Structure formats: C-alpha cells, structure tokens
Amino acid sequence: MPAPEQLKLMLSQEEIRRGVERLAREVNRDYQGKNPLLLGILKGSFVFMADLIRLLDVPVEIDFVALSSYGSARVTSGEIKVVQGLRTSVKGRDILVIEDIVDTGITVSYFLDYLRRKKPSSLRLCALFDKPSRRKVAVAIDYLGFTIPDKFVVGYGLDYDQRFRHLPQLYALEEPE
C-alpha cells in the first residue's frame, strides 16, 4: 500500500462540497417539472451521486450500471466490460448520467451511445471531474464540477485497486521515488 506521503491533495472536502452544490443548482434549474432518471456509473460515482441527490429538489429515480475498462491498472484497457447492466427502461425518459470522472472518454461515450439507441426523451451527462488532456473520444459534459490535470486521482469515490474511495478529498496518487 502506498505511503501517505504519496497522496498529494488536489481538492479539499469543502471545495468538492461547493462544486456539488453548484451542480445541484444547475440540475434543479434544468429539471424543474420533470422526473429524471439518474443513472450512476459504478463504482466511482456512488459517493458523488449520493451527495448530489440529497441536494436536489426535483423528484428523481435512480439506477446504476457497472462498467469497467481499468481493472486493477492505472490506465484504461480501452475495452468496456458491462459488469451490471440497466434494470430500468429509459425509453421516453429524461436521463441524467452521473459519472465520477471523464478521462479518455471511452467508457462514458460507449454508455451514452448505448443509451441513445434506447431512445430516451433527453440525455445529459453530469461529471464531477474531467481530465480533457487524456481525451481519446469526444464527450460533451452538460454539468461539470472540476477540470483537473493529468494525474491519477483517488478519493471521493475514486480508487486505485479498490483502495482510497473512502477519502473525502481528491488526491493525486504519485509514483514512489
């Protein structure tokens, strides 16, 4: 397990809280009078999604999918594995996909294309973190919390080999010297 000094603080708990509050205001504004289905991409989005929905004043339904392209590696394999698929019909629904981080864009682009084929009424993406410098596939993010540099990050739901999800801040996981 990496030593604590290998974790470099990028965003404090307070900064993240303010970002989530801002995103909730934007979602509340755009979904007034609607009942959107929020689809969380597991596992990383669960902390963000839980904090976000507690701040919403519009009625929402939730579901989760589990997609993987990393396994225990630090870089994406580029191949998407559906670990847990949709259990809720999206046809004719207002869909808001909740993602922890958009990195290469491969995984979320795959999922958005899949959802478009299911014919939702509307489809938007809400991501807490974005690393545009790593993008391989163009992705339009409708609600964005933070743009971050090209560092491997952990905390606030994001992990490295199933570790560090519990941290309330966002850290860069730095290589040992």
Image (cartoon, rainbow, N blue to C red):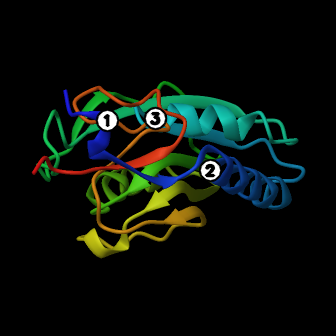
Please report contact status of discs 3 and 1: CB closer than 8 Å, yes or no.
no
For the question of whether residue 135 can be seen, the reply is: no
Residue flagged by tag 1: what amino acid is it? Pro
Q: Residue at x 82, y 53 (%)?
A: 28
Could you say where residue 31 lies in the image, as x and y percent from the top left?
80, 54
What is the x, y in percent for residue 170?
47, 47
Would residue 47 appear left or right of 112 to someone viewing this image? right
Q: Is residue 139 above or below residue 98?
A: below
What number is the disc on residue 101? Answer: none
Percent position of residue 118, x then y = 47, 47
Q: In the depicted view, which residue is nearer to us: 3 or 50?
A: 3
Which circle marks residue 16 in the picture?
A: 2
Q: Amino acid at mark 3?
A: Gly
For the residue carrying disc 1, how many other residues have a C-alpha within 10 Å: few (<14), some (14-19), or many (20+)?
few
In-front residue for pair 14/39:
14
Mark 3, Cα crowd under 10 Å, few <14 / some 14-19 / many 20+, is: many
Q: Which residue is mark 3?
A: 157
Circle number at residue 4: 1
Measure how far apart labels 2 and 1 are at the Cα level: 21 Å
